[in-house]
Amino acid sequence: MMSRYNMPGTFFTIFFMVPLLNNAQSIKPEMVKPRIIVTTDITNEPDDQESLIRLLLYANDIDIEGLIGSTGVWKLCDPATEVIHECIDGYAQVLNNLLKHDDSYPTAEHLHSITVTGNQGYGMSHVSGRGSAGSRLIIDAVDKDDPRPVWLLAWGGTNTIAQAIWTVSQTRSQEELEAFLQKIRVYDLAAQDDAGAWMAKTYPQLFLIRNVLAYKGMSFRFSSDAWNHTRGGDETVVTREWVRENIQEGHGPMGELYPDALHIWEGDTPTYFYVMPNGLNDPEKQWQGSWGGRFTREKQKNVNIVAQEYAGADCSKGCFVNESLFLDYWLYADAEDTWTYQDKSYSNQWAPIFRWRTDFQHDFAARMDWCIKAYQDANHAPIVALEDDITTGVQYLKAKPDEELSFSASKSYDPDGDELTFQWWIYPEAGTYNGEVNLEPDGKAGVKIKTPADIGSKEIHLILSVTDHGQPALTRYRRIVIQGS
Ligand SMILES: [Ca+2]
Ligand SMILES: [Ca+2]
């Protein structure tokens, strides 16, 4: 099916001479930074700490407003908030060098000040009373006079988030509760307690994504062959050797703080990949597809791990979260992509993440270089311009059947003066039009598209990937959504 969308001859390269500026750290797209608060069951296994190290290196692109030690099904009590502080201490040691690459990194003192402990016991049985420092931090953040939504990202259980909602429900009017719910977005990584089901059941209006199993696309599993069916894509950038060379060794304190994987690398990282302002997606539209996965357009019923992974297994020893008190609930869940890599085609719920693995691992490697290298010795991502627009926003437009459209990214440039490769392509699953769409190169960095005669009111998602020729090669994106009218 994907071959219908192949576009031979659409990889083309241009070279821009951009004067290298001394003050290059100010070269960025015009982005709206997402606001996030993380709850993490850090120390349950090494992967939360890995995710946190990477996240801190994106504190220039994402407004981190809370880092909350939490519990979860794999860590039933005693949140390890002190380990979050240890990682921030590592950040403090490299901050001066990071500032050479982007002057908007926050201070370590600020990050320490927003690091607190959430609810100390497991699940809904520990939601009550006046809550925790974590739940109060969430409420205070949502109450700020800031029009942007607050993304609540659960790397373990979600009961500190549920506590915040519960407290508001007990202390404010129905109208104020509704306003609070409208301001938050929840991304639940794999249902690690029963509070996600409670939120979804009690507040069906809540924007709630559950990454059910898609996170396994981050890397293959080291500890056993149990997830071999989830493998695919570029695995060269998640081997232990690659991580040792590009992350852990020779990159300073943050690399030294990045532990070896026990099962997989960074299972919780898709939560913030999803809101990364790299031009790929609008996180308000969960079906678009992002580094952090792609999710269903409509909410799904009772989508939990038991149903998909442990069906028929003996769970008497507790291999799943019991959500039976909160059925039926509805939330957005994993969607599937069909994607071809090196002549192998994948159609599953892991492809929406592993299809980006080369890009997001290269990006991480570059950030690790920023910890130790001078500006001119490290790589920085291209700035993608759609005509004159250098934001990271998705463009939406209406078009008639058989209308000829053309788009140009020729004003894109690279802060390092690197050569750029442009790839225009259709993301079929993100759209609703199922037929053939023809793309033709237009000049060095443009594309022509003729809307199909039978487009009706359906959507076509046109993606532009711009990759520099730096080391490691870095990619940024733009998306144009064409809707028939
Ligand atoms: Ca976790
Ligand atoms: Ca570059």
Image (cartoon, grey):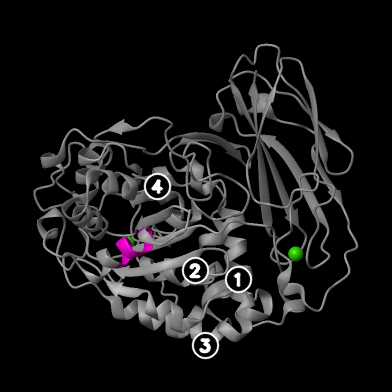
Would you say 296 lies left or right of 21 here? left
Would you say 214 lies left or right of 93 here? left
| Distance between mark 4 and mark 2 Cα atoms | 25 Å
User: Which residue is drawn at the image coordinates 73% and 39% (left, top)?
Assistant: 424
Classify mark 4: helix, strand or loop.
helix
User: Which residue is drawn at the image coordinates 38% and 79% (left, top)?
Assistant: 113
Quadrant housing the C terminus: top right
Among numbered discs 1 and 2, the one appearing first in the sequence: 2
Which of pointers 4 and 1 indicates the residue nearer the eye?
Answer: 1
Q: Are marks 1 and 2 in contact (CB under 8 Å)?
A: yes
Query: Of the numbered discs in the image, which one, if any, rests on residue 45?
Result: none
Among numbered discs 1 and 3, the one appearing first in the sequence: 3
| Distance between mark 1 and mark 3 Cα atoms | 15 Å
Residue occupied by mark 1? 367
Quadrant housing the N terminus: top right
Classify mark 1: helix, strand or loop.
helix
Residue occupied by mark 4? 228
Magenta-tinted stretch: 137-142
Q: Is residue 102 visible?
A: yes
